[in-house]
């Protein structure tokens, strides 16, 4: 089992990565890791994520109350949204919040990331909705976020940024990278006349691959993010079962439960994608 000091070092390393990749500016962003049901490590407020060292990291309980923090440091005021994720998603081990430029631009424009334009995004990320605007540091953000938590592994925060979560710190960070990469490609392809989307048959193949390999997290294939049914991932009704028709703000579409429970590493995902692409040709 990794000790707390090693996890603190990992948090600092991820902080440097999001800072160096221009996913945050100045003191923006925050990171947290679950130690157990009652203890969590998190980044402090008012500190650049690119210049942290382990003694900066705070420990809080499940309510966000401070368990341990060195003098001069206190938890981010946005720890509330992290705690809501852990509360509603017991499978989650880490949460990352950042302001990546392309993804945040979509959040500001009010455009969810829903177009199936590349295998990696469909298989490992899924749709990325927009949680309604909430005032930073208040309960408005976690309250607006809550209804998306049972169904997604990443959201855009309206006029704010992006939030990702997964089984561990590295996986949560990689989801943030994936969100930003997806947003950048979608933006650039729109500048070239619009992206070419996968048809339903190919989306169905991608979801089938995802189910076969038991990808971790939640990955809805039945929630239409656009009321007209356009530009949303769907599985064509192939997996049947779960009914999410009561999901607030969404339109029931195909009926599918594509969540998984077993971890799959990135090399496996890459091999899956190569196989799927070859079958599409």
Image (cartoon, rainbow, N blue to C red):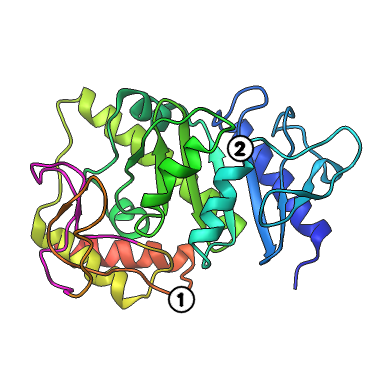
Q: Is residue 146 above or below residue 36?
A: above
Q: Is residue 281 visible?
A: no
Q: Which residue is mark 2?
A: 78
Residue 252 rendering spot, x and y as whole percentages: 15, 56
Residue 163 rendering spot, x and y as whole percentages: 48, 43
Q: Nearer the viewer, residue 151 or 104?
A: 151
Alpha carbon distance from label 1 to label 2: 30 Å
Q: Quadrant of the C terminus?
A: bottom left
Disc 2 residue crowd, few under 14, some 14–19, many 20+, Cα 10 Å: many
Query: Nearer the observer, disc 1 or disc 2?
Result: 2
Question: On the image, which quarter does residue 97 sit in?
Answer: top right
Residue that lies at the very extreme toward the right in this rendered image: 71
Left or right position of 228 against 64: left
Disc 1 residue crowd, few under 14, some 14–19, many 20+, Cα 10 Å: few
Q: Is residue 109 visible?
A: yes
Residue extent of the magenta highlight: 219-240
Q: Which residue is mark 1?
A: 262
Left or right position of 236 against 63: left
Which element carries disc 2, helix, strand or loop? loop
Kindly indicate whether the residue at mark 2 contacts the one at mark 1 (C-beta within 8 angstroms). no
Which residue is depicted at the point 80% across and 60% down? 4
Q: Quadrant of the N terminus?
A: bottom right
Q: Is residue 270 above or below residue 156?
A: below
Which residue is depicted at the point 74% across and 29% down? 47
Left or right position of 115 against 169: left
Q: Nearer the viewer, residue 263 or 279?
A: 263
Which residue is depicted at the point 62% across and 32% down? 20
Q: What's the magenta bit mostly, secondary-structure-wise?
A: loop
Which element carries disc 1, helix, strand or loop? loop
Question: On the image, which quarter does residue 271 sit in?
Answer: bottom left
Q: Is residue 11 above or below residue 235?
A: above
């Amino acid at each position: 089992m990794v000790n707390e000091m090693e996890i603190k070092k990992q948090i600092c390393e991820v902080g440097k990565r999001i800072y160096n990749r221009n996913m945050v500016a100045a003191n923006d962003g925050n990171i947290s890791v679950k130690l157990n049901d009652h203890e969590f490590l998190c980044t402090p407020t008012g500190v650049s994520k690119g210049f942290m060292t382990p003694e900066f990291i705070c420990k809080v309980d499940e309510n966000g109350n401070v368990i341990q923090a060195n003098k001069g440091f206190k938890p981010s005021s946005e720890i509330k949204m992290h705690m809501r994720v852990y509360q509603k998603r017991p499978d989650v081990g880490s949460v990352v919040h950042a302001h990546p430029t392309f993804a945040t631009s979509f959040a500001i424009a009010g455009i969810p990331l829903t177009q199936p334009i590349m295998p990696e995004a469909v298989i490992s990320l899924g749709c990325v909705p927009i949680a309604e605007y909430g005032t930073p540091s208040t309960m408005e953000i976690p309250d607006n976020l809550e209804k998306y938590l049972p169904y997604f592994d990443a959201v855009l925060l309206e006029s704010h940024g992006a939030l990702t979560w997964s089984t561990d710190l590295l996986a949560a960070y990689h989801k943030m990278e994936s969100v930003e990469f997806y947003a950048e490609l979608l933006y650039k392809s729109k500048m070239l006349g619009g992206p070419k989307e996968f048809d339903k048959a190919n989306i169905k193949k991608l979801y089938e691959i995802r189910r076969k390999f038991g990808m971790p997290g939640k990955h809805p294939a039945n929630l239409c993010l656009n009321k007209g049914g356009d530009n949303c991932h769907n599985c064509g009704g192939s997996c049947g079962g779960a009914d999410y028709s009561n999901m607030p703000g969404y339109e029931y579409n195909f009926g599918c439960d594509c969540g998984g429970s077993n971890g799959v590493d990135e090399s496996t995902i890459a091999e899956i994608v190569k196989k799927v692409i070859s079958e599409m040709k």
